[in-house]
Amino acid sequence: MATRLAFVLAMVLMASTGCLTRPGGALAPLALPPESRSVTLEYTVGDFEFTLEGGKMITSNKAGRDLNEQLLRRWKKKGYVSEFSYVESSRFTGKADYQLVLTGSQYGDSSIGAQILSGLTLLLLPYTVNTSYDVQYTLEKVATGERYSATVEDSFHTTVELLLFLAAPVSMRGFSSTMDAMSDHLYQQLRDKGAFAPPAPGSAMGRPLSAADLAAR
């Protein structure tokens, strides 16, 4: 009975565990205005490496997809794209306006010893994880075949401790700030290189008018 009670108490304590994140701050915040676009996008995960000290809990592809969902949801919220969807192994359908490939790496640096010690104390002692990102985007405009690239590096720091559940309302603020900065910088780099620009005057669907286009007018 005592063993069962101790187990239940341990599970309650674990469920109450909190964390607190703070941004790495490698990228300065950008004040990008919201836009309204009808651009659609398909994306896939290319050569992306996920490493976590203490063991790999998810696959590299899953980590890359989760990261890209965070970044692209911010694009959609600000109106940079209207819709985006994932395709496996670069199996693009050609139906979207743009095709995006994510490559790079995600690395979580943490002390295995500190994690074990924290677990033995039911997380009364904290442990930390430093998560670093190196992200490359390769974007292709389907109508013209034009390609654009962008790259960013940033990180966030996580402290895990039992009593940090009290900080729940602001616990993910650092992570969110890092995602905001990475998302904005990737978009700005691509935009500066000519991506997402509306079709130029005198063009059809973003490509120069051909003789057939002119004859059809």
Image: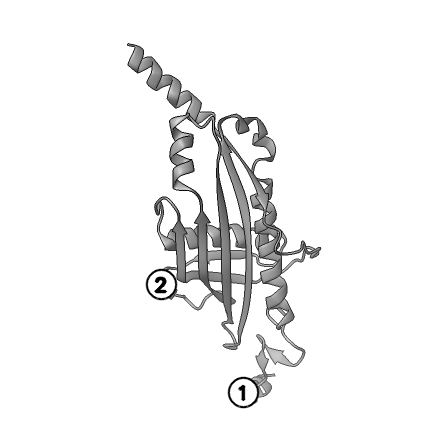
Name the residue at 56% across, 31% down. Answer: 168
The residue carrying mark 1 is 212
Element type where label 1 sits in the image: helix
Residue sticking out furthest to the bottom: 211
Q: Residue at x 49, y 27 (%)?
A: 162
Choose between 6 and 117: the one closer to the eye: 117
- Tell us which disc is closer to us: 1 or 2: 2
Q: Amino acid at mark 1?
A: Ala
How busy is the neighbourhood of tag 1: few (under 14 within 10 Å), some, or many (20 plus)?
A: few
Circle 2 packing at 10 Å, graded few (<14), some (14-19), many (20+), is few
Question: Residue 104: x, y in percent?
Answer: 45, 61
Which of the two discs, 1 and 2, labels the residue nearer the N terminus? 2
Quarter of the picture containing the N terminus is: top left
Q: What is the C-alpha distance between the residues marked 1 and 2? A: 35 Å
Q: Is residue 21 above or below residue 183?
A: above
Q: Which residue is mark 2?
A: 89
Q: Residue at x 60, y 40 (%)?
A: 173
Q: Given the image, on which type of amino acid does mark 2 rest?
A: Ser
**The quadrant where residue 164 appears:** top right
Q: Residue at x 39, y 52 (%)?
A: 51
Q: Nearer the viewer, residue 76 or 127?
A: 127
Quadrant of res 151: bottom right
**Regarding mark 2 in the picture, which secondary structure is present there?**
helix
**Residue 36 coordinates in the image, percent (x, y):** 65, 58
